Image (cartoon, rainbow, N blue to C red):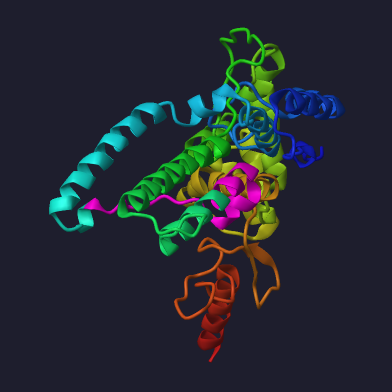
């Protein structure tokens, strides 16, 4: 699906023409939008879910909405951005008069200087949004008048006029912040369609919780049988996702066998005997219990977190990657994969943690052999 906001024409200023332009764009992407809400958008996820609030399609639709909202002949624009503007200006006009009276008998102090807001609109924002680009040009013109202290006719301006210009500049800058916040907000869909109540749903199953994964692992056979009869619930989907997680988790051969034997319902004594016969591996009951209750569920959780991270940095965010100088594999440039190092430019070591561990083990074996 292409980006709909690329077809917006900001040269159009009236609301009717903009509305007609948006209707034409929507009609061209009609099938893609319907496919998005049918196949990608999940109504069971709340407004903080990544599939709706911060997805590329939702942000694209938000840009179309803002394109219609901020038109020159729109009454909604001024109300939405600054509903208090009229009252605020009245207060500031009276304040200016008081300052002028005071300054006649007292020198100007630092308190009477109009301060620029701490939150600012950056150059990148002005490149992205045409509305902020126009206000930026206005601020530059006002700055030029304040610095030169001369008007457009070349005449010197009194201190009162300079003071008013500073107030106007501050007002525009505060309005810019309001516009920036409105443009960067996410669209929140309250109700797309009526959802029937489902009392058997297993919502918000977290595969990154080791307790939940351990329960699914230990009760796999029982839950699998119940999923066959769970027609209206989500147990089938949960079990399918868990099985997919099992297939993607990389384990050693003997751990895979323990995994399958545990699902089949074998006792610890049987599993210990089979491990000894097949792999000549001596295993105690406490070690086997730790493997089934902690080690294997932790590996499943890590596999899920890794897949979630890959999905996030592929479809939602743009991640910074770093290549390991040893294994030549690329990872997300974070302390999860690389140890911190103050002297390097990226703040991370050039070799990943996995390679450093393997090198440490090799050095230990070499030392013992000597």
Q: Quadrant of residue 324?
A: bottom right
Query: Residue at 77% across / 40% down in the picture?
Result: 3
Q: Nearest the camera: 326 or 160?
A: 160
Query: Residue at 43% across / 26% down in the picture?
Result: 83
Region rendered in magenta: 112-136
Q: Quadrant of residue 130?
A: top right
**Residue 150 coordinates in the image, percent (x, y):** 44, 59
Q: Nearest the camera: 120 or 313?
A: 120
Q: Is residue 48 above or below residue 370?
A: above
Looking at this view, name the residue that lies furthest to the left.
Answer: 105
Query: Residue at 66% across / 35% down in the picture?
Result: 63
Residue 107 is left or right of residue 349, and the answer is left
Query: Residue at 62% across / 23% down in the picture?
Result: 223
Q: Nearest the camera: 324 or 344?
A: 344
**Residue 147 coordinates in the image, percent (x, y):** 42, 63
Q: Is residue 276 above or below residue 346?
A: above
Q: Is residue 207 visible?
A: no
Q: Is residue 102 visible?
A: yes
**Residue 154 coordinates in the image, percent (x, y):** 49, 60
**Residue 91 coordinates in the image, percent (x, y):** 29, 32
Q: Quadrant of the N terminus?
A: top right
Residue 348 is left or right of residue 230, and the answer is left
Q: Is residue 27 magenta?
A: no
Residue 137 is left or right of residue 101, and the answer is right
Q: Is residue 133 magenta?
A: yes
Q: Is residue 210 above or below residue 189?
A: below
């Amino acid at each position: 699906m292409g980006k709909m906001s690329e077809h917006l024409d900001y040269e159009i200023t009236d609301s009717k023409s903009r509305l007609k332009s948006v209707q034409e764009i929507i009609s061209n992407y009609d099938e893609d939008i319907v496919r998005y809400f049918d196949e990608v958008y999940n109504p069971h996820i709340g407004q903080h879910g990544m599939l709706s609030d911060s997805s590329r399609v939702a942000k694209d639709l938000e840009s179309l909405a803002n394109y219609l909202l901020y038109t020159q002949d729109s009454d909604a624009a001024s109300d939405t951005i600054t509903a208090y503007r009229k009252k605020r200006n009245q207060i500031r006009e009276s304040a200016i008069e008081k300052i002028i009276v005071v300054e006649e008998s007292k020198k100007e102090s630092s308190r009477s200087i109009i301060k620029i807001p701490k939150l600012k609109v950056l150059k990148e924002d002005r490149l992205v949004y045409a509305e902020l680009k126009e206000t930026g040009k206005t601020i530059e013109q006002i700055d030029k008048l304040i610095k030169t202290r001369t008007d457009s006719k070349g005449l010197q301006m009194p201190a009162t006029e300079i003071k008013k210009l500073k107030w106007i500049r501050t007002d525009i800058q505060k309005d810019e912040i309001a516009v920036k916040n409105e443009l960067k907000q996410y669209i929140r869909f309250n109700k797309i369609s009526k959802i029937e109540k489902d009392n058997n749903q297993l919502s918000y199953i977290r595969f990154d919780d080791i307790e939940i994964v351990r329960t699914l692992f230990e009760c796999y056979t029982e839950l699998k049988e119940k999923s066959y009869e769970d027609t209206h619930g989500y147990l089938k989907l949960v079990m399918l996702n868990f099985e997919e997680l099992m297939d993607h988790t990389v384990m050693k051969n003997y751990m895979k066998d323990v995994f399958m034997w545990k699902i089949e319902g074998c006792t610890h004594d049987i599993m210990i005997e089979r491990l000894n016969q097949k792999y000549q591996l001596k295993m105690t009951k406490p070690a086997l219990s730790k493997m089934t209750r902690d080690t294997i569920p932790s590996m499943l959780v890590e596999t899920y977190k890794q897949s979630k991270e890959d999905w996030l940095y592929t479809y939602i965010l743009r991640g910074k990657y770093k290549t390991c100088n040893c294994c030549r594999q690329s990872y997300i440039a974070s302390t999860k994969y690389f140890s911190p190092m103050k002297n390097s430019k990226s703040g991370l070591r050039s070799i990943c943690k996995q390679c450093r561990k393997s090198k440490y083990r090799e050095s230990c074996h070499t030392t013992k052999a000597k």
